[in-house]
Image (cartoon, rainbow, N blue to C red):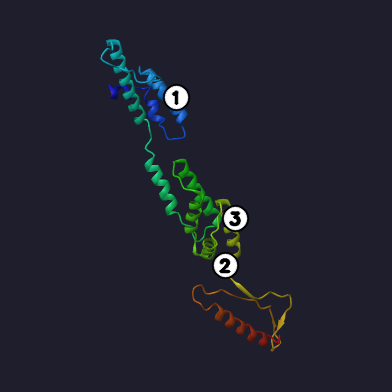
Amino acid sequence: MLARSFFSPLAAILKENKLIGLNYVDWKRNLNIVLIANGYNVLTEPYPEIDDNSTEEELEAKRQWRKTDQMTKCYILASMSNSRPAKQAAIRAIMNTRMAEVASVRDHMLKMISCFNEGDTLGVDINGQSQVDMVLETLTDSFRQFKLNYNMGMLNMTLPKLMKKLQAVEAITEPQSTVQLAQSSTLRLKSKGGKILEPLTMSVTPLKGSGRQGDSVKESMACAWGLEQEYGLL
């Protein structure tokens, strides 16, 4: 009886429009339509009281009430979406997201906020301060000093304010690819031999992770000093 009723054409309405939390009003309306169409009146009265003096009509009303109650429960359970896997997927997305080295902090923050919003829609309850803490853990090492200052100062920010602060830090700490040691000049240089030479420019690329950036700059400056002597600028 249950299988025939539930897989009726009208019951397909519930199968295609399962309860996912935000569509409760529409889902309840569809549920009432299916129940009434299949002869199960919507229960609006309490369970009928039965005793030893109850008539056969009252006993039949009790049986009908219980049957309707059981069928309603079956329809409800069968038309509810299993949201637990969706919640778990949303939590995994939040926990596994990390800021890429080449990404801007703004794009990363927008991605994290989107993950939080999706989780909130599915019932994943994460308070604002915990969201900020989770975002800080996803940042690259270039924000290490900011994270230290944030934790030591026991600061409290919203996600939009945090994004604004991180963008300011990103603008300040953005690495410079080259260091200019000399600028182009409109003056034409002349060597000791009298040959006209083009203006001299030079740049040095810092050696990342080598710890010899200062030495590289000193060596280049020494080189430039020698060339200036050669060109007769000193």
| Numbered disc total | 3
Q: Residue furthest left?
A: 52
Q: Which mark is residue 29?
A: 1
Crowd rating for badge 2 (residues with CA inside 10 Å; few <14, some 14–19, many 20+): few
- Mark 3 and mark 2 in contact? Answer it, CB < 8 Å: no
The N terminus: image quadrant? top left
Say what secondary structure mark 2 lies in.
loop
Q: Is residue 10 left or right of residue 55?
A: right
Q: Is residue 188 visible?
A: yes
Q: Is residue 159 left or right of residue 49?
A: right
Crowd rating for badge 3 (residues with CA inside 10 Å; few <14, some 14–19, many 20+): some
Crowd rating for badge 1 (residues with CA inside 10 Å; few <14, some 14–19, many 20+): few
Say what secondary structure mark 1 lies in.
helix
Please provide percent x and percent y for residue 145. 53, 66
Residue drawn at (41%, 22%) of the image: 32
The mark lying in front, picked from 3 and 2, is 3
> Mark 2 is on which residue type?
Pro
Please provide percent x and percent y for residue 204. 58, 75
Q: Which mark is residue 175?
A: 2
> Mark 3 is on which residue type?
Lys
Query: Image height check: is 183 above or below 67?
Result: below
Please provide percent x and percent y for residue 183. 68, 74
Say what secondary structure mark 3 lies in.
helix
Which of marks 3 and 1 precedes in the sequence? 1
Residue at the spot of label 3: 164
- The residue nearer to you, when weighing 16 against 50, is 50
- The residue nearer to you, when weighing 170 against 152, is 152
> Mark 1 is on which residue type?
Arg
The C terminus: image quadrant? bottom right
